[in-house]
Image: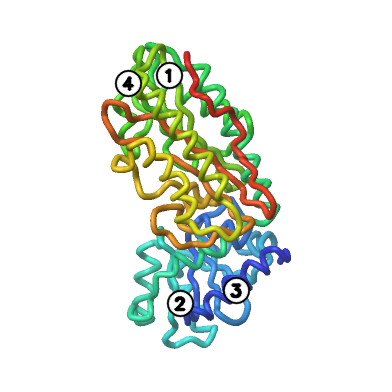
Amino acid sequence: MAPRFAQRFKRIQALMADTDLDLLLVTNRENLIYFTGLTQIECLAVLIPREGEPCAITLWVDAEYVQQESGLTTYGYFFPRESLGSKLVERIKAYGFKAPRIGFERYFVPYAVYDALRQAFSEENFVAAADLFYRVRSIKEPEEVELIRRAAAAACRGMEAAIKAVRPGVTELDILAEAEYAMLKAGSEGSPFRPQVVSGERTLLTHPCASHKKVQPGEVVVIHLGATYEGYCAKMCRTVAVGAISPGREEVYRILVEAQEKAISVLRPGARSWEVDAAAREVIKRAGYEEYYLDVVGYGVGLRQSEFYPIIGKGRTEIIEAGMVVDLLLPTIYRRDIGGPRITDVIYVGEERNEILTDYPKELVKV
């Protein structure tokens, strides 16, 4: 096993000891990539005991490949007489556990796996352990930062292509098509979320995605793109004015850029998440728009486009550490007459200074 993967297991085992967990079950694609380095993943799970060596379980035809590539002792199951769930139960018992406290991820545990586990062990000992995974993934190794940097470069190429495609009469999907093609040509392996190319009143929706709507003169177009490289994500957002837009919307974009810059200046090792948020919020408050503003302005970024440690927001107490990668700041001013413009970037927190990985001009684009 490569040393960096061995260290990842040791770090999460230390967190397991702090929370009195016997085992962690890993079936989520993001965590499987993190602990094995494999991106071609199907029918795979990893078991991490609090003490001892972790192991992998997969289809028997893939077991040799998984063991060779990951360095983990790998057990194959013979489908259909065996299943991933039954093999997990077998290996948990082989560790010597009779009533283990098992930690689960936030998402994507197959029902068949869960059903096999609850038939063999008490559900009273099943524990939500998503925070452990997000915490251990929050400090990025140099190799991880480089992969995010490559994803960010692809996202920037997509943004450049999207902006060139904006003009009255084209659909949001037309613009997105140009962006996605450019990102794929630049090395992206696909978007980590449904890309958001939205215009007009649709820019005030919370989680919009590109549609057949045609761009009209006098509207703003919000372009929120993501790219991936070997599983790692980057995302960015910019705003385009199509012809003359209202002075209020131009002012909103200027305020958001200033708020983002203030937040980035406070984003440093030792700061608490609420302090980063407060720096941005003060700009919004001074402009008179705090009541129209959301309470979260950023998340960790890595194997997921929005990881849940740290969360940058009002009242959040996470401590910012060197090596974290976060995005700042997607909310708009949610007021119908002037709201809609948005901006966000992915930032690496260094020991001495920050690096904006999505290095692309921030001024309001006018076409």
Find out whether the residues at labels 2 and 1 contact each other: C-beta distance under 8 Å: no
The local crowd at label 1, few if under 14, some if 14 to 19, many if 20 or more residues have their Cα within 10 Å, is many
Q: Which residue is mark 1?
A: 241
- Label 1 vs label 4: CA separation? 16 Å
Determine whether the residue tagged by mark 4 lies in a helix, strand or loop.
loop
Quadrant in the rendering for residue 209: top left
- Label 2 vs label 4: CA separation? 51 Å
- Label 4 vs label 3: CA separation? 50 Å
Q: Which residue is mark 4?
A: 213
At x 51%, y 79%, the residue is 18
Quadrant in the rendering for residue 111: bottom left
The local crowd at label 2, few if under 14, some if 14 to 19, many if 20 or more residues have their Cα within 10 Å, is some
Find out whether the residues at labels 2 and 4 contact each other: C-beta distance under 8 Å: no
> Which of disc 4 and disc 2 is earlier in sequence?
2
- Label 2 vs label 1: CA separation? 57 Å
Farthest residue in the front direction? 286
Q: Is residue 8 above or below residue 242?
A: below
At x 39%, y 49%, the residue is 296
Question: In the visual, does 329 lie left or right of 219?
Answer: right
Question: In the visual, does 295 lie left or right of 309?
Answer: left
